[in-house]
Each structure stands twice: as structure tokens, then as C-alpha cells.
Image (spheres, rainbow, N blue to C red):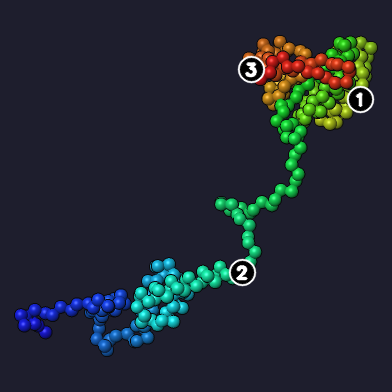
Amino acid sequence: MSGPCGEKPVLEASPTMSLWEFEDSHSRQGTPRPGQEPAAEEASALELQMKVDFFRKLGYSSTEIHSVLQKLGVQADTNTVLGELVKHGTATEREHQTSPDPCPQLPLVPRGGGTPKAPNLEPPLPEEEKEGSDLRPVVIDGSNVAMSHGNKEVFSCRGILLAVNWFLERGHTDITVFVPSWRKEQPRPDVPITDQHILRELEKKKILVFTPSRRVGGKRVVCYDDRFIVKLAYESDGIVVSNDTYRDLQGERQEWKRFIEERLLMYSFVNDNKACHRPLLSN
């Protein structure tokens, strides 16, 4: 049908046309005649699915959308449905805030997974133990200490015990004493030894270590125990307790020379009941 001037009339959309009416007008273009249209139930189901998909994109759940559409009807316009969804969401949040939580609050889990740690029921370490954990390992030259306590005439094992106890009383836990293994043999007049049982006792406590020795052709062959002493102290970043300056070992390795200069702890005995130590050079 044409107008007076031969122009076709233009259909204008009503300002009050809803989004769904506008979409329906587009969907009707090019659709088949009434005889070919789908059944009314299928059209209603299609419209319902379109509305559900639309509001799900806005962040609402299918349950909320179906509940509101069941209340307002499928033909309700977009603004009405959206307003009802907003009211529905606010009411749901209010119910959650007022209703008591039936489940106890779960413990927080650190980011990255894992199970929460149980509270530590162990008592804190005493101050002495905390300080002891920062102390350096101690390596004692057993022969030097024992002969010094015996006035260089007798191998006095009591002197070794006094030195060990002196460090234990000050919180040290890593203490090693080196003594040649032949000191376990029966004492002889030319090599007197006193309180020999102390060596066994300290060995059982894993404080004293015997350096190897053996007899070849009736003669005693011993290892150079000074090298054991300096090597262990150097590798463990500890200190050496001795009045020996180990000049021969200082000449073997430059790093040992510097270590001995900085970590050699010299001593003297007083009143036969404790060892008093003084550092030659300290850090």
C-alpha cells in the first residue's frame, strides 16, 4: 500500500514498547505463515529461555529468575522483572544475616592450600637454651688440656672433664674432644695417666673421639691428631681450645692460618675446679 505520493508508510516503534516486544517484532520478520508457526507452548518456552539467559548474564541465578517469572508471568517487561530480582536478592541477604549459622566456623586455610596448623602447646625454650643455639661448636685438644692440667708430667683426664663442664655450664651443646686412642692402654711409668675412666665416660656421651693409632713392628704409629682438631673446627665454623699455636698446620693452608689466628681459644686452670679461657684473637 502506498501513500498519496507513492511512498510506503514507515512504521514507528512506540516509546513504551518493551525490549521483548521489540525483539518479537524482529523475530516475526520473515517468519512463516500461521500455518507454519511453532506451537504456542514452544514459543512460550523459547521466550522463557531467552529471558532466563538474559538475566543470568546480569549475575542472577536460574532459581531466582524462575521464582520471579513465576510470580510476575513470562510476559512481564524487563524493568519489572529486574526490579523484582533486586528486591528478591535484598530479602535473601537479610535472611542470611538474621538467621543463626547452623555450621561452626571453619578454621582459615592459608592461600595455596594445606591444612591449618594446630596451636603449639610446647612451652617456650628457656633463655639459656636460646642463647646456646647461637654458640659456636667447640673442639678441644684433649692431649694439650690433659698435659697442661697435669703440669706437663701426667696425662690428667680430670683436666679434660673440667674443660668440658666449663663449656656445658655456659650453654654449649656441640663439644668434641680429640684424644689419641693409645691413651686407652694400660698406664706405664714412662707415660703416667690419671682418672683414665673419664675418657670412657666421655666417649659414651659422644663427646670424646679417639684418633686412630696402631703398632707396627713393636712401634706405635699414631695419626697427627692436631690435623683432626683443626680440620673439624674449620669445617664446622667452630673454635679450637688449646695452648698450642699449630704453627706447622698454619704453613700447610692459608685458610687454616687465618682460622687459627682468629678462632684459637687459649686457657689456664685455677684451683683445679674449672678452666678459665681467654681468646688469642676474637671476631
Amino acid type, callout 1: His
Ranked by sequence position, the earlier of labels 3 and 2 is 2
For the point 71% across and 26% down, which residue is it? 136
State the residue in front, 135 or 91: 91
Dots 2 and 1: beta carbons under 8 Å? no
User: Horizontal and vertical percent for residue 18?
Assistant: 30, 77
Q: Which mark is residue 255?
A: 3
Q: Secondary structure at mark 1?
A: helix
- The residue at the point 61 percent across, 67 percent down is 101
Work out whether mark 3 precedes mark 1 in sequence or the reverse, and give the earlier one: 1
- Which residue sits furthest bottom? 35
Residue 224 in sight in this render: no
Q: Residues within 10 Å of mark 3 (few under 14, many from 20)?
A: few
Q: Nearer the viewer, residue 239 or 31?
A: 239
Tell me the distance, in whole angstroms, between the alpha carbons under discs 3 and 1. 37 Å
Depth check, mark 3 against mark 2: the one in front is 2
Q: In the figure, residue 106 lies in which quadrant? A: bottom right
| Viewer-closest of 239 and 5 | 5
